[in-house]
Amino acid sequence: MSSNTNADIWIAGAFAAFTVDLIVFPLDTIKTRIQSPSYQKRYTQGPSNAPSRALFRGVYQGVGSAIVATLPSSGAFFTTYEGVKSILSDNNPTIGGSKLLPQPLIHAAASGTAELVSCAILTPAEVIKQNAQMVDRSASGGGFGSATWQTLARFRSNPLALWRGYSALAGRNLPFTALQFPMFEGLRDRIRRYRNEQGIRTHTLLESGLITAVSAGIGGSISAVVTTPVDVVKTRIMLSAAESAAEDQTPAKKAGQGGKGVFVDATGKTMQEAKQGLVEAVKNVAKPPSSKGSLQIAREVIQEHGVKGLFRGGLLRGVWTMLGSGLYLGVYESGRIYLANRRGESYDGEDSG
């Protein structure tokens, strides 16, 4: 593994996530709105269904929740990724002069494991973010942070429902990272090898960052376009999570309704009601965020818009993923090198994995 400490990886990952969130978030908001079921109704105008101004209004809605969650989730992702990659590489037996596990498989397994850990942290923020991106602030009176607060209010009685989108998020991110990281690592190694063979390798911080950014951008954009159908389904599932949470809420009984001599808590619920409410909240986490399954949602999209409906927003997703992945992994790699070199350790981003 590299000479970086876990602290280096967490800091570099968090800084990379913060940078990308601020720069790329508007494109993600537009992509979410294009993929939403209400796109044509809310964000187009005229007989030609041309995009309306509403599509580009409030493009930073929900950015706060995204930043708060992506800082720890990115640190968890890279720590897990580097750790699993190192373990698999160090314990990969040699059979017949070649390694048992090919390097792309190791990269796919490490990134997939890291994604499962990251999604557990990121899911609530992703649900809040995508629902906040759809809030019409002109109709709600505007105000800073109102979109996020309006979304949070919908989960007030059942906050655990925020994790219902975990399977949808992991289902989207797992194939994406499993495709992206082997391509990214392979392209980066080829570019480094080519520059070494040509005698033009400088081993500078800027060169390492640019090589990583280009490799990540290419790998990320290809993976993004290929997995767009999964992303379309995931977006619709996430947007339905708020409605699903609202359906779980039951009207609370009025305070004191338990009768004389029956103790009630500060919310006016009896002890039995409070216990039942907790049990129901825990049970609700296991419920899907939508009453419809992924295949059913995909079929509905095809019926409404044809197969091309599953690729709606694919070009935009490919562009912003190229930009986002390039910045994300480029800044991350540069941060790792800078932090290692700052301690006096010679490290240019290359390791045994």
Image (cartoon, rainbow, N blue to C red):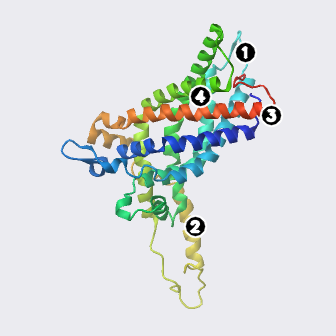
In space, the residues marked 1 and 4 are separated at their CA atoms by 19 Å
Disc 1 element: strand
Check disc 4 and report the residue beneath it: 108
Who's the residue at 53% across and 85% down the image?
258
Task: Give residue 94's mark.
Answer: 1
Q: Nearer the viewer, residue 183 or 169?
A: 183
Give the image location of residue 80, x and y in percent: 67, 37
Disc 4 element: helix
Check disc 3 and report the residue beneath it: 343
Left or right: where 345 falls relative to 215: right
Q: Is residue 145 visible?
A: yes
In space, the residues marked 1 and 3 are separated at their CA atoms by 35 Å
Task: Give residue 217's mark.
Answer: none
* Discs 3, 4 touching: Cβ within 8 Å: no
Q: Quadrant of the N terminus?
A: top right
Crowding near pointer 1: few (<14 within 10 Å), some, many (20+)? few
In space, the residues marked 2 and 4 are separated at their CA atoms by 39 Å
In the picture, residue 308 is in which quadrant? top left
Q: Is residue 38 visible?
A: no
Q: Nearer the viewer, residue 138 or 147?
A: 138
Q: Is residue 292 above or below residue 153?
A: above
Mark 3 or mark 4: which comes first in sequence?
4
Mark 1 or mark 4: which comes first in sequence?
1
Q: Is residue 257 above or below residue 139?
A: below
Mark 1 or mark 2: which comes first in sequence?
1
Question: Which-is-in-front pick, marks 1 and 4?
Answer: 4
Task: Give residue 278's mark.
Answer: 2
> Looking at numbered disc 2 in the image, what kind of residue is underneath it?
Leu
Disc 2 element: helix
Q: Is residue 276 above or below residue 82?
A: below
